Image: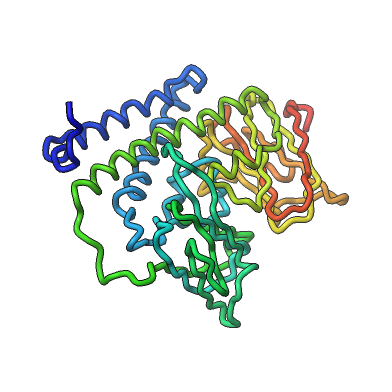
């Protein structure tokens, strides 16, 4: 049977039916034998899929035209992916290596600002990885904080962010040290030489966009469920994470990641001890099984280098427990019995490996 054209698929409704069927299949990630089977974790898993669907439709339909990119905030308090950093203000835009772009704005006072170009996505079958990266510290910025950054596959003098012919996305990471005192960078993006307005929607754009959106939901959920299941083989440990795997998942090349799985009884606590290396920033955070950061709007589930209390020798002891043990650096489980966790060093020249141990609350008292 000959393949239907996008026009025929849209008119017949097959485009929409395929999208719905693919979302149904993605639900099998939540039902895996390696995933938690209790009602609470399953409910969070299906909510996670709904969140991924929301951001996927924005990424591959509403804001998917690389000719007219929009620098938007897809990952926020209710869209959480792959151990999202609670201190980060994430932004992204659809781009294409066939075009040149200009990012411009003001630096603000945010602690860390980084720009990356990437190929592929979590649900794509082709090449996936990072193509270029620039920190604000590498850019020429005016006395008033104003700057411009050219994004192109061809080398450009001055502030230039490289990409490849098949680059497809831009990710901006803005990291707070202290949200109460810092201002984010105010940024805009445009394609150089673009016309006054984008073309009207076509059946081909819709057909491809819905297919890519459903593939993103399935691919993203499967990828990080695989990670969580792997971490669970070493419970309550925090090993160093392979930089190559982090880069393929669109991680920041300036970060050393330590990922792990935690599970605690009602009267237990997990102690994470380490002497932080000299670095630009570090934090530790608590996630659920699906690698979503826990709700940092209402619970203290993360601490960074500015917030943490250190010992006289410079070392740190973080305490993860269901209830406040009356010790410094307590992190909440926010009603969870298990989940994943992440420690990151940003700009560290050396690797400092944390140690972990489970203790009874009576022992701590």
**What residue is shown at x 62% (from left), y 43% (from top)?**
285
* 7 or 354, nearer to the observer: 7
Residue 324 in sight here: no
The location of residue 296, given as percent across then percent down, is 54, 47
Q: Which residue is drawn at 43% across and 45% down?
A: 79
- Figure label count: 0
Residue 352 is left or right of residue 168, and the answer is right
Name, please, the residue furthest toward the left: 11
Q: Residue reaching furthest top?
A: 33
Q: Is residue 164 visible?
A: yes
In the picture as drawn, the residue positioned furthest to the bottom comes out as 143
- Vertical order, 216 against 104 (above or below): above
Residue 1 picture location, percent across and down:
17, 26
Residue lying furthest right = 313
In the image, 14: left or right of 35? left
Which sits in the foreground, 8 or 235?
A: 8
Q: Identify the residue at image location x=25%, y=67%.
A: 197
**Residue drawn 57% across the image and 60% down it:** 114
Vertical relation: 207 (above or below) 280? above
Q: In which quarter of the image is the C terminus?
A: top right
Quadrant of the rendered image containing residue 101:
bottom left
Q: Where is residue 280 in the image (x, y as percent from the top left)?
A: 70, 58
Q: Which of 47 and 165 is in front in this view?
A: 165
Give residue 217's quadrant in the image: top left
Q: Where is residue 53 in the image (x, y as percent from the top left)?
A: 35, 40
Colour style of the rendered protein structure: rainbow
Q: Is residue 124 left or right of residue 194?
A: right
């Amino acid at each position: 049977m000959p393949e239907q054209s996008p026009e025929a698929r849209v008119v017949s409704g097959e485009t929409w039916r395929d999208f719905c069927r693919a979302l149904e299949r993605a639900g099998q990630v939540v039902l895996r034998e390696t995933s938690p089977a209790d009602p609470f974790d399953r409910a969070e898993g299906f909510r996670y899929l709904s969140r991924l669907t929301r951001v996927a439709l924005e990424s591959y339909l509403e804001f998917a035209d690389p000719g007219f990119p929009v620098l938007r905030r897809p990952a926020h308090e209710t869209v959480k992916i792959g151990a999202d950093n609670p201190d980060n203000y994430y932004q992204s835009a659809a781009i294409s290596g066939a075009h040149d772009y200009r990012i411009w704005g003001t630096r603000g006072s945010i602690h860390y600002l980084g720009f990356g170009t990437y190929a592929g996505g979590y649900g794509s079958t082709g090449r996936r990885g990072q193509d270029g990266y620039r920190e604000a510290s590498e850019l020429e910025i005016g006395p008033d904080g104003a700057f411009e950054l050219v994004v192109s596959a061809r080398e450009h003098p001055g502030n230039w962010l490289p990409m490849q012919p098949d680059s497809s996305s831009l990710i901006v990471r803005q990291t707070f040290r202290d949200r109460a005192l810092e201002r984010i960078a105010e940024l805009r993006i445009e394609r150089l030489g673009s016309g006054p307005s984008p073309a009207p929607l076509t059946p081909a754009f819709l057909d491809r966009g819905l297919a890519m959106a459903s593939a993103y939901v399935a691919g993203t959920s499967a990828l990080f469920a695989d990670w969580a299941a792997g971490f669970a083989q070493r419970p309550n440990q925090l090993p160093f994470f392979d930089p190559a795997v982090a880069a393929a998942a669109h991680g920041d090349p300036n970060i050393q990641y330590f990922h792990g799985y935690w599970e605690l009884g009602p009267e237990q606590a997990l102690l994470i001890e380490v002497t932080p290396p000299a670095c630009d920033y570090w934090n530790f955070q608590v996630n659920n099984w699906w690698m979503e950061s826990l709700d940092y709007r209402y619970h203290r589930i993360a601490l960074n280098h500015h917030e943490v209390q250190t010992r006289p020798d410079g070392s740190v002891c973080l305490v993860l427990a269901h209830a406040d043990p009356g010790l410094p650096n307590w992190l909440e489980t926010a009603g969870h019995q298990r989940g994943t966790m992440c420690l990151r060093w940003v700009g560290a020249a050396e690797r400092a490996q944390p140690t972990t141990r489970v203790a009874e609350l009576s022992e701590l008292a």
